[in-house]
Amino acid sequence: MSIQAGTLWAITIAALICGPIQAQAPLDLEVRSIAFDDQSPSVKTRYTPLTRAQKPWRFCVLYPHLKDAYWLSVNHGMVAEASRLGVGFDVFEAGGYPNLSRQISQLKGCASDEFDAVILGTVSYDGLTPVVQEIAKIKPVIAVVNDIAPDGITAKASVSWAEMGAAAGRFIAQRHPPGSPPVTVAWFPGPKGAGWVSIVESGFHAAIAQSSAKVVMTLYGDTGLEQQVLLVEDALEAMPEVDYLVGSGPMAEAAVSILRGRNANGDVQIVSTYLSHAVYRGVKRGRILAAPTDSPVTQGQLSIEMAVRALEGRLDMRHAGPPIWVVTPESADQLNMAGSLAPASFVPVFSLAPKTAP
Protein backbone atom coordinates (compact mmCIF):
# COMPACT_ATOMS: atom_id res chain seq x y z
CA MET A 1 0.00 0.00 0.00
CA SER A 2 1.38 3.42 -0.88
CA ILE A 3 1.56 6.06 1.81
CA GLN A 4 -0.92 8.17 -0.15
CA ALA A 5 -3.43 5.34 0.12
CA GLY A 6 -3.06 5.43 3.88
CA THR A 7 -4.32 9.00 4.11
CA LEU A 8 -7.91 9.23 5.28
CA TRP A 9 -8.34 12.88 4.53
CA ALA A 10 -6.52 16.19 4.81
CA ILE A 11 -7.79 19.56 5.90
CA THR A 12 -6.23 22.98 5.71
CA ILE A 13 -4.74 24.52 8.80
CA ALA A 14 -5.13 28.09 7.56
CA ALA A 15 -8.43 28.53 9.37
CA LEU A 16 -7.04 27.10 12.60
CA ILE A 17 -3.73 28.92 12.96
CA CYS A 18 -3.60 32.61 12.13
CA GLY A 19 -1.73 35.72 13.09
CA PRO A 20 2.02 36.16 13.69
CA ILE A 21 4.18 33.35 15.05
CA GLN A 22 4.32 33.51 18.84
CA ALA A 23 7.19 32.37 21.02
CA GLN A 24 6.44 29.12 22.82
CA ALA A 25 6.56 29.32 26.60
CA PRO A 26 9.18 27.14 28.32
CA LEU A 27 8.11 23.58 29.08
CA ASP A 28 8.59 21.70 32.34
CA LEU A 29 10.05 18.32 31.36
CA GLU A 30 11.65 15.28 32.91
CA VAL A 31 14.72 14.09 31.00
CA ARG A 32 15.84 10.48 31.41
CA SER A 33 19.45 10.18 32.50
CA ILE A 34 19.78 7.10 30.27
CA ALA A 35 17.90 7.53 27.01
CA PHE A 36 15.13 4.96 26.37
CA ASP A 37 15.44 3.53 29.88
CA ASP A 38 12.33 4.43 31.87
CA GLN A 39 13.92 2.91 34.98
CA SER A 40 16.77 5.42 34.94
CA PRO A 41 16.51 8.55 37.10
CA SER A 42 14.88 11.58 35.52
CA VAL A 43 16.13 15.14 35.76
CA LYS A 44 13.63 18.00 35.96
CA THR A 45 14.37 20.50 33.20
CA ARG A 46 12.95 23.85 32.14
CA TYR A 47 13.08 23.51 28.37
CA THR A 48 13.08 26.51 26.02
CA PRO A 49 11.58 25.57 22.61
CA LEU A 50 13.12 26.64 19.34
CA THR A 51 12.07 29.94 17.82
CA ARG A 52 12.02 28.78 14.20
CA ALA A 53 13.23 25.83 12.13
CA GLN A 54 16.16 26.51 9.84
CA LYS A 55 14.37 24.90 6.88
CA PRO A 56 10.74 24.08 6.00
CA TRP A 57 11.13 20.42 6.92
CA ARG A 58 8.34 17.90 6.34
CA PHE A 59 7.65 14.93 8.61
CA CYS A 60 5.93 11.60 8.16
CA VAL A 61 3.77 11.09 11.27
CA LEU A 62 2.24 7.73 12.22
CA TYR A 63 -0.47 7.21 14.87
CA PRO A 64 -2.05 3.98 16.12
CA HIS A 65 -5.48 5.58 15.59
CA LEU A 66 -7.52 8.71 16.13
CA LYS A 67 -10.44 6.98 17.82
CA ASP A 68 -10.27 8.91 21.06
CA ALA A 69 -9.37 12.31 22.39
CA TYR A 70 -5.94 11.23 23.58
CA TRP A 71 -4.34 11.04 20.13
CA LEU A 72 -6.39 14.02 19.01
CA SER A 73 -4.61 15.98 21.73
CA VAL A 74 -1.22 14.70 20.53
CA ASN A 75 -2.20 15.86 17.03
CA HIS A 76 -3.15 19.29 18.37
CA GLY A 77 0.26 19.68 19.98
CA MET A 78 1.99 18.75 16.72
CA VAL A 79 -0.14 21.18 14.71
CA ALA A 80 0.57 24.08 17.05
CA GLU A 81 4.32 23.48 17.21
CA ALA A 82 4.82 22.69 13.52
CA SER A 83 2.86 25.81 12.54
CA ARG A 84 4.93 27.93 14.90
CA LEU A 85 8.27 26.54 13.66
CA GLY A 86 7.32 26.64 9.97
CA VAL A 87 7.54 22.90 9.32
CA GLY A 88 4.92 20.52 7.92
CA PHE A 89 3.76 16.93 8.16
CA ASP A 90 1.43 14.26 6.85
CA VAL A 91 -0.36 11.96 9.29
CA PHE A 92 -1.18 8.30 8.64
CA GLU A 93 -3.14 6.33 11.24
CA ALA A 94 -3.23 2.55 11.46
CA GLY A 95 -6.87 2.35 12.49
CA GLY A 96 -6.20 0.51 15.75
CA TYR A 97 -3.64 -1.54 17.64
CA PRO A 98 -4.37 -4.84 15.85
CA ASN A 99 -3.26 -3.32 12.54
CA LEU A 100 0.48 -3.89 12.71
CA SER A 101 0.80 -4.83 9.04
CA ARG A 102 -0.89 -1.60 8.00
CA GLN A 103 1.46 0.49 10.11
CA ILE A 104 4.47 -1.39 8.74
CA SER A 105 3.30 -0.50 5.23
CA GLN A 106 2.80 3.12 6.24
CA LEU A 107 6.24 3.25 7.86
CA LYS A 108 7.87 1.93 4.71
CA GLY A 109 6.22 4.78 2.84
CA CYS A 110 7.91 7.22 5.22
CA ALA A 111 11.20 6.39 3.48
CA SER A 112 10.04 8.57 0.58
CA ASP A 113 12.25 11.54 -0.27
CA GLU A 114 9.32 13.91 0.38
CA PHE A 115 9.82 13.37 4.13
CA ASP A 116 12.83 14.53 6.12
CA ALA A 117 12.08 12.65 9.36
CA VAL A 118 9.60 10.22 10.91
CA ILE A 119 7.54 10.69 14.08
CA LEU A 120 6.21 7.31 15.17
CA GLY A 121 3.39 6.50 17.58
CA THR A 122 3.73 2.74 17.38
CA VAL A 123 1.10 -0.01 17.63
CA SER A 124 3.72 -2.55 18.74
CA TYR A 125 6.77 -2.52 20.98
CA ASP A 126 9.06 -4.37 18.57
CA GLY A 127 6.94 -5.28 15.55
CA LEU A 128 8.29 -2.38 13.49
CA THR A 129 11.93 -2.65 14.55
CA PRO A 130 13.39 -4.02 11.26
CA VAL A 131 11.74 -1.23 9.25
CA VAL A 132 12.72 1.41 11.82
CA GLN A 133 16.35 0.31 11.60
CA GLU A 134 16.34 0.60 7.80
CA ILE A 135 14.73 4.03 7.75
CA ALA A 136 17.06 5.27 10.51
CA LYS A 137 19.94 4.85 8.07
CA ILE A 138 18.58 7.72 5.97
CA LYS A 139 16.58 9.96 8.33
CA PRO A 140 15.76 10.50 12.03
CA VAL A 141 13.01 8.44 13.65
CA ILE A 142 11.38 10.08 16.67
CA ALA A 143 9.17 7.93 18.92
CA VAL A 144 6.16 9.61 20.53
CA VAL A 145 3.97 8.48 23.45
CA ASN A 146 4.01 4.68 23.09
CA ASP A 147 6.95 2.63 24.27
CA ILE A 148 9.07 1.08 21.54
CA ALA A 149 12.24 -0.98 21.18
CA PRO A 150 15.16 1.48 21.06
CA ASP A 151 16.87 0.02 17.98
CA GLY A 152 17.02 2.74 15.35
CA ILE A 153 15.21 5.36 17.42
CA THR A 154 16.84 8.82 17.36
CA ALA A 155 14.84 10.38 20.20
CA LYS A 156 11.70 9.76 22.21
CA ALA A 157 8.99 12.10 23.54
CA SER A 158 7.20 10.06 26.18
CA VAL A 159 6.58 9.37 29.84
CA SER A 160 6.87 6.13 31.77
CA TRP A 161 3.68 4.17 31.23
CA ALA A 162 4.62 2.03 34.21
CA GLU A 163 4.38 5.20 36.27
CA MET A 164 0.99 6.02 34.69
CA GLY A 165 -0.31 2.63 35.79
CA ALA A 166 1.33 3.01 39.19
CA ALA A 167 -0.27 6.44 39.68
CA ALA A 168 -3.73 4.93 39.21
CA GLY A 169 -2.83 2.00 41.47
CA ARG A 170 -1.43 4.22 44.22
CA PHE A 171 -4.62 6.25 44.25
CA ILE A 172 -6.60 3.09 45.04
CA ALA A 173 -3.96 1.84 47.50
CA GLN A 174 -4.17 5.08 49.47
CA ARG A 175 -7.94 4.64 49.79
CA HIS A 176 -7.60 0.97 50.80
CA PRO A 177 -4.35 0.39 52.71
CA PRO A 178 -3.28 -3.08 53.88
CA GLY A 179 -5.53 -4.39 56.62
CA SER A 180 -8.58 -2.39 55.55
CA PRO A 181 -11.72 -4.18 54.26
CA PRO A 182 -10.98 -5.84 50.91
CA VAL A 183 -12.24 -4.36 47.64
CA THR A 184 -12.48 -5.85 44.15
CA VAL A 185 -11.20 -4.42 40.87
CA ALA A 186 -12.14 -5.13 37.27
CA TRP A 187 -9.07 -4.19 35.23
CA PHE A 188 -9.24 -2.97 31.60
CA PRO A 189 -5.61 -2.47 30.55
CA GLY A 190 -6.18 -1.99 26.79
CA PRO A 191 -5.34 -4.04 23.70
CA LYS A 192 -3.35 -7.17 24.46
CA GLY A 193 0.03 -7.04 22.71
CA ALA A 194 0.28 -3.25 22.44
CA GLY A 195 3.65 -2.10 23.76
CA TRP A 196 2.27 0.22 26.42
CA VAL A 197 -0.29 -2.18 27.88
CA SER A 198 2.01 -4.65 29.62
CA ILE A 199 4.00 -1.72 31.00
CA VAL A 200 0.89 -0.03 32.43
CA GLU A 201 -0.11 -3.37 33.93
CA SER A 202 3.23 -3.87 35.65
CA GLY A 203 3.03 -0.45 37.29
CA PHE A 204 -0.60 -0.84 38.32
CA HIS A 205 -0.20 -4.31 39.82
CA ALA A 206 2.93 -3.31 41.72
CA ALA A 207 1.13 -0.33 43.24
CA ILE A 208 -2.00 -2.14 44.41
CA ALA A 209 0.03 -5.04 45.80
CA GLN A 210 0.44 -2.81 48.86
CA SER A 211 -3.30 -2.48 49.46
CA SER A 212 -6.45 -4.42 50.25
CA ALA A 213 -7.58 -4.18 46.60
CA LYS A 214 -7.62 -7.32 44.48
CA VAL A 215 -7.96 -7.61 40.69
CA VAL A 216 -10.68 -10.20 40.15
CA MET A 217 -11.18 -9.75 36.42
CA THR A 218 -8.99 -8.59 33.50
CA LEU A 219 -10.55 -7.66 30.16
CA TYR A 220 -8.31 -6.76 27.22
CA GLY A 221 -9.57 -4.93 24.17
CA ASP A 222 -8.97 -2.15 21.66
CA THR A 223 -9.42 1.36 23.05
CA GLY A 224 -12.27 2.24 20.71
CA LEU A 225 -15.34 3.32 22.68
CA GLU A 226 -17.63 0.64 21.19
CA GLN A 227 -15.30 -2.16 22.24
CA GLN A 228 -14.91 -0.75 25.74
CA VAL A 229 -18.70 -0.48 26.16
CA LEU A 230 -18.98 -4.20 25.46
CA LEU A 231 -16.20 -5.03 27.91
CA VAL A 232 -17.68 -2.94 30.72
CA GLU A 233 -21.09 -4.51 30.19
CA ASP A 234 -19.52 -7.99 30.24
CA ALA A 235 -17.74 -7.18 33.51
CA LEU A 236 -20.85 -5.87 35.22
CA GLU A 237 -22.93 -8.81 34.07
CA ALA A 238 -20.34 -11.24 35.44
CA MET A 239 -19.74 -9.35 38.68
CA PRO A 240 -22.32 -6.59 39.31
CA GLU A 241 -21.01 -5.89 42.82
CA VAL A 242 -17.42 -5.19 41.79
CA ASP A 243 -16.05 -2.16 43.65
CA TYR A 244 -13.83 -0.55 41.00
CA LEU A 245 -13.62 -0.34 37.22
CA VAL A 246 -10.06 0.71 36.33
CA GLY A 247 -8.56 1.16 32.88
CA SER A 248 -8.22 3.28 29.76
CA GLY A 249 -9.89 6.62 29.09
CA PRO A 250 -12.53 5.13 26.74
CA MET A 251 -13.32 2.48 29.36
CA ALA A 252 -13.90 5.17 31.99
CA GLU A 253 -16.05 7.16 29.57
CA ALA A 254 -18.12 4.07 28.75
CA ALA A 255 -18.45 3.15 32.41
CA VAL A 256 -19.91 6.53 33.37
CA SER A 257 -22.76 6.15 30.88
CA ILE A 258 -23.38 2.48 31.67
CA LEU A 259 -23.49 2.99 35.43
CA ARG A 260 -25.82 5.95 35.02
CA GLY A 261 -28.14 3.78 32.93
CA ARG A 262 -28.09 1.13 35.64
CA ASN A 263 -28.66 3.69 38.41
CA ALA A 264 -25.43 2.39 39.90
CA ASN A 265 -23.52 5.65 40.24
CA GLY A 266 -21.74 5.55 43.59
CA ASP A 267 -22.01 1.79 43.91
CA VAL A 268 -19.08 1.14 41.54
CA GLN A 269 -16.13 3.54 41.40
CA ILE A 270 -14.19 4.45 38.25
CA VAL A 271 -10.48 5.23 37.88
CA SER A 272 -8.86 5.96 34.52
CA THR A 273 -5.22 5.30 33.65
CA TYR A 274 -5.05 8.45 31.52
CA LEU A 275 -6.92 11.67 30.81
CA SER A 276 -9.21 12.58 27.91
CA HIS A 277 -11.89 15.24 27.46
CA ALA A 278 -14.66 12.87 28.54
CA VAL A 279 -12.60 11.62 31.48
CA TYR A 280 -11.90 15.19 32.56
CA ARG A 281 -15.63 15.99 32.50
CA GLY A 282 -16.27 12.83 34.51
CA VAL A 283 -13.67 13.82 37.09
CA LYS A 284 -15.04 17.36 37.36
CA ARG A 285 -18.54 15.97 37.97
CA GLY A 286 -17.33 13.42 40.49
CA ARG A 287 -18.26 10.46 38.27
CA ILE A 288 -14.61 9.40 37.88
CA LEU A 289 -12.43 9.40 40.98
CA ALA A 290 -9.03 10.01 39.40
CA ALA A 291 -6.99 10.02 36.20
CA PRO A 292 -3.25 10.59 35.81
CA THR A 293 -2.33 12.92 32.97
CA ASP A 294 0.83 12.69 30.88
CA SER A 295 0.06 15.93 28.98
CA PRO A 296 -0.35 14.49 25.45
CA VAL A 297 -0.45 17.96 23.87
CA THR A 298 3.01 18.65 25.28
CA GLN A 299 4.28 15.27 24.04
CA GLY A 300 3.08 16.15 20.54
CA GLN A 301 4.86 19.50 20.71
CA LEU A 302 8.04 17.90 22.00
CA SER A 303 8.15 15.30 19.22
CA ILE A 304 8.13 18.07 16.60
CA GLU A 305 10.89 19.89 18.50
CA MET A 306 13.00 16.73 18.63
CA ALA A 307 12.57 16.04 14.91
CA VAL A 308 13.66 19.58 14.00
CA ARG A 309 16.62 19.48 16.37
CA ALA A 310 17.73 16.07 15.08
CA LEU A 311 17.76 17.36 11.49
CA GLU A 312 19.59 20.56 12.43
CA GLY A 313 22.22 19.02 14.71
CA ARG A 314 20.70 20.64 17.79
CA LEU A 315 19.34 17.57 19.60
CA ASP A 316 20.55 17.86 23.20
CA MET A 317 18.10 15.47 24.91
CA ARG A 318 17.12 12.13 23.43
CA HIS A 319 14.41 11.04 25.86
CA ALA A 320 12.11 13.42 27.71
CA GLY A 321 8.48 14.00 28.60
CA PRO A 322 6.24 16.07 30.85
CA PRO A 323 5.78 15.20 34.53
CA ILE A 324 2.82 12.99 35.49
CA TRP A 325 0.24 14.16 37.99
CA VAL A 326 -3.11 12.79 39.10
CA VAL A 327 -6.28 14.74 38.38
CA THR A 328 -9.06 14.37 40.96
CA PRO A 329 -12.29 16.33 41.55
CA GLU A 330 -10.34 18.39 44.11
CA SER A 331 -7.43 19.20 41.76
CA ALA A 332 -9.22 19.37 38.39
CA ASP A 333 -9.34 23.16 38.32
CA GLN A 334 -5.54 23.28 38.60
CA LEU A 335 -5.04 21.27 35.40
CA ASN A 336 -2.85 22.82 32.70
CA MET A 337 -5.45 22.40 29.97
CA ALA A 338 -3.16 23.76 27.25
CA GLY A 339 -0.67 20.93 27.79
CA SER A 340 -3.15 18.16 28.51
CA LEU A 341 -6.13 18.41 26.17
CA ALA A 342 -6.90 19.82 22.73
CA PRO A 343 -9.64 22.48 22.58
CA ALA A 344 -13.12 20.98 22.26
CA SER A 345 -13.49 22.56 18.80
CA PHE A 346 -10.29 21.02 17.43
CA VAL A 347 -10.58 18.56 14.54
CA PRO A 348 -7.73 16.28 13.40
CA VAL A 349 -5.24 17.67 10.94
CA PHE A 350 -3.80 15.08 8.58
CA SER A 351 -1.74 17.38 6.35
CA LEU A 352 0.09 20.59 7.16
CA ALA A 353 2.26 22.35 4.60
CA PRO A 354 5.58 23.78 5.80
CA LYS A 355 5.95 27.55 5.66
CA THR A 356 9.00 29.57 4.77
CA ALA A 357 10.04 32.32 7.17
CA PRO A 358 8.33 35.67 6.52
Image: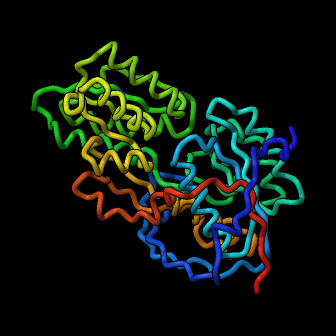
Residue 58, position in %: x, y? Answer: 78, 64
Residue 275, position in %: x, y? Answer: 41, 49
Instruction: Name the side, left or right, on which 330 lies relative to 60.
Output: left
Question: Is 308 placed above or below 237 here?
Answer: below
Question: Is 259 placed above or below 358 here?
Answer: above
Residue 125 visible at all? yes
Instruction: Name the side, left or right, on which 111 lies relative to 157.
Output: right
Q: Residue at x 27, y 30 (%)?
A: 244
- The C terminus lies in which quarter of the figure? bottom right
Q: Residue at x 40, y 47 (%)?
A: 164
Residue 193, position in %: x, y? Answer: 57, 29
Question: Is 111 placed above or below 117 here?
Answer: above
Q: How is the image coloured?
A: rainbow
Q: Quadrant of residue 5?
A: top right
In this rendered view, identify the residue nearer to me: 118 or 287: 287
Residue 52, position in %: x, y? Answer: 68, 81
In this rendered view, identify the residue nearer to me: 198 or 183: 183
Q: How many marks?
A: 0
Q: Residue furthest top?
A: 238
Residue 140 visible at all? no
Q: Residue furthest right?
A: 113
Instruction: Name the side, left or right, on which 262 lies relative to 201.
Output: left
Q: Quadrant of residue 172?
A: top left
In this rendered view, identify the residue nearer to me: 291 or 318: 291
Q: Residue at x 33, y 45 (%)?
A: 282
Question: Is 82 placed above or below 76 here?
Answer: below
- The N terminus lies in which quarter of the figure? top right
Q: Residue at x 19, y 27 (%)?
A: 183
